[in-house]
Amino acid sequence: MTVTTAPPARSVDDPLGLVGRVLPVWVLPALLAATILVTLGLFAVTPMQGKADFVVVAAVIYVALQTAASFSVEGRRRAVDRFFTTLVYTAFAIAMIPLISVVVTVLRNGAEVINGNFLTHSLRNIGPTDTGGGIYHGMIGTLEQALITSVISIPIAVLVAVYLVEYGRGQLARAVTFFVDVMTGIPSIVAGLFIFTVWVLILGFSRAGLPATFALAILMIPTVVRSTEEMLKLVPNELREASYALGVPKWRTILRIVIPTALPGIVTGIMLGVARVMGETAPLLLLIGATDSINTNPFSGPQSALPFIIFDQAARPNDQAVARAWGAALVLIVLVMLLNLIARVIARFTRVR
Amino acid sequence: MANEPRNPGSRPRVGQQQSDSGVGRISGVALGDAPALGSGAVTGLGGASTRFGDRVFKSLSQGASVLLLVVIAAIAIFLLTRTIPALQDDTVNFLTEKKWLPDSSPSVFGIAALATGTLVTSLLALLMAVPVSVGIALFIAHYAPRRLANGLGYIVDLLAAVPSVVFGLWGLKFLVPHMVGLTKFLADHLGWFPMFDVGDGSTYRQTMFNASVVLAVMILPIISAVSREVFLQVPTMHLEAAQALGATRWETMRMAVLPFGRSGVISASMLGLGRALGETVAVALVLSTNYEISLKILNPGGNTFAANIALQYGFAGDTGINALIASGMVLFVITLLVNMTARWIIGRRAAFSGAN
């Protein structure tokens, strides 16, 4: 009875034949197997070699086979759809490669050097080809600088966000919104150069941890303003109005109602900002002064920091120095990821609804 | 439309509050005037202290905002105070000279090589990162299973959290040696293409190509995060309309999602470009710098504004420092322009898009 219709398979699910012909389920795994066989053959007869090359060649062949098969059975539109679906999945896979690679190499190389000695000693009197030495001075520096940067940035950033959400009207607010966005794009080296010009060249002060934190604050403030602004906007207007109705002045409403309600979100933004600033290197090159010794005073004398140690040691030609750079990188990544994780957890469990 | 219930407390955007219904206007008035009314009522009981507190708090927050604008202006002004003497000391054309010998006499330096290197590495990075980022954004926004999507988004965001100096270390010690094969392949088989020409041979290490790949990895999460947000804002009705016409998933993307997100992707790319232009330590570590103008990206060499500042700073004398600050000023202006354009595109889109 179905003699005249071209697609012979009318299933129970599709009695009217509305669905076009679809590749059977077994085709794709079969194509994959065929691809691997073909690629193995290619690698056997041609000079191609290497795991990465294999994956790339196999992927190209697979996409070609799949598209061809789909084209012949399902038609052009579905073939194109399958082709782009594969591309989209591939794009995601490509993005995973560097992430996994960075994490694995840092973990593997860093774990070799990290021990109690590495975490509790400085690089004082450690020659370039010596093994040993540690990054204690850098950890002290990074933590102190991050702390001071936060002390400078958080009040300013939160006040700016409050201004934008609660008071901002007209020209000034629009200008501030725009320039906060623009400020997120200021290269860190330019922020460093600016503070260097003012602090060292014009004021004549010497380099220390403190000026570095000024430059870091320029980089941290806009990110925190952005996230805080988003969080303040999420606070329901009813809360503000209820407070006003009770006769509470606006500033107390903001301090006692709006900010506490948005606090978890604000904290999340701050943590992400701190995590970002901790890894900034460029301003440090110009401003912290650099030392191999422990200096717990950020206000005077040269200091060190983890990103600086990584940059400094990685650029040296000796394996011992590079090993120390990997160790410092692992410690820095752990610090940054820890802050990120805490921020995400806070955001997840105490979301403003 | 998704935004409206979420930010009732936001300052009115142009035209939004006025065009709202009566309810919107009442809440708008209540927002603006309630503190005045409230404090007016309280004045009789608690004295003028509440108004005083309001005034202090408002001026504090306003002051902080003005401070931000002042900082931006100060950056430009203070960099300029050193840029001008540097240009006066320069004995050649600052824009077209490629050598960088500011401390020799006569002082000879210019940004031609730096500018070329910066543009070439950044644009190449953009070329590699944008298609992949759009793919990731589409994947997370519309392809991945709903429950997985958020987690996958976080993973990509983690890539953004890795400090740039770690990318530099990874690029120098892991990526560069592992890319020799690919670089050699390109040089051997596509050497007829001028940019892949290596001339008398190359070590295939620490090339501008390497630097671009590291930059591409670094800007990927930024571009994909912004694009993802835009793709998620595509009105459901557009998607459903496309599907109702029998569109396949890709056709839905092509007809509904990509046109809607185009300006978002463009501005995201410009944000990424801004980041790539200003990236310092990763490039400084990966490149073996020189001052040649060359588009042959598979040869070692190349340089960028930011990397040059980081590497030359330690050796610079008085004129040298000024010269570096002058180059920093150029970088500042370029990134400022790129970022302002990006924000302008985003802003224009927000004002006219049908989604809000």
Image: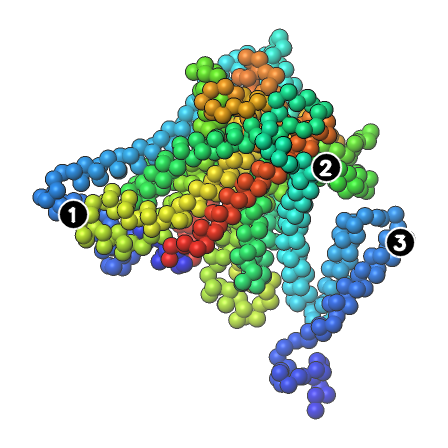
Q: Nearer the viewer, residue B258 or A284?
A: A284
Name the residue carrying label 2: B176
Would residue B241 appear left or right of A229 to someone viewing this image?
right
Chain ID of residue with mark 3? A
Say whether disc 2 or disc 1 marks the residue closer to the N-terminus: 1
Label 2 – label 1 distance at C-alpha: 66 Å
Q: Is residue B279 visible?
A: yes
Chain ID of residue with mark 1? B
Q: Circle 1 sits in a helix, a strand or a loop, which is it?
A: helix
The amino acid type found where label 3 is placed reads Ala
The amino acid type found where label 2 is placed reads Val
Label 1 – label 3 distance at C-alpha: 85 Å
| Image position, residue A273 (x, y; %) | 47, 40
Name the residue carrying label 3: A44
| Image position, residue A268 (x, y; %) | 44, 46
Would residue A353 appear left or right of A185 to someone viewing this image?
left
The amino acid type found where label 1 is placed reads Leu
Q: Is residue B117 visible?
A: no
Residue occupying the point 59% across, 53% down: B136
When the figure is inspected, residue A202 is found, relative to residue A171, above or below; the finding is above
Chain ID of residue with mark 2? B
Other residues around mark 2 within 10 Å, as few (<14) / some (14–19) / many (≥20):
many
Name the residue carrying label 1: B37
Q: Are marks 3 and 2 on the same chain?
A: no
Q: Circle 2 sits in a helix, a strand or a loop, which is it?
A: helix
Would residue A305 appear left or right of A298 to someone viewing this image?
right
Q: Nearer the viewer, residue B264 or A76?
A: B264
When the figure is inspected, residue A140 is found, relative to residue A71, above or below; the finding is above
Q: Are marks 3 and 2 in contact (CB under 8 Å)?
A: no
Q: Nearer the viewer, residue A107 or B332?
A: A107
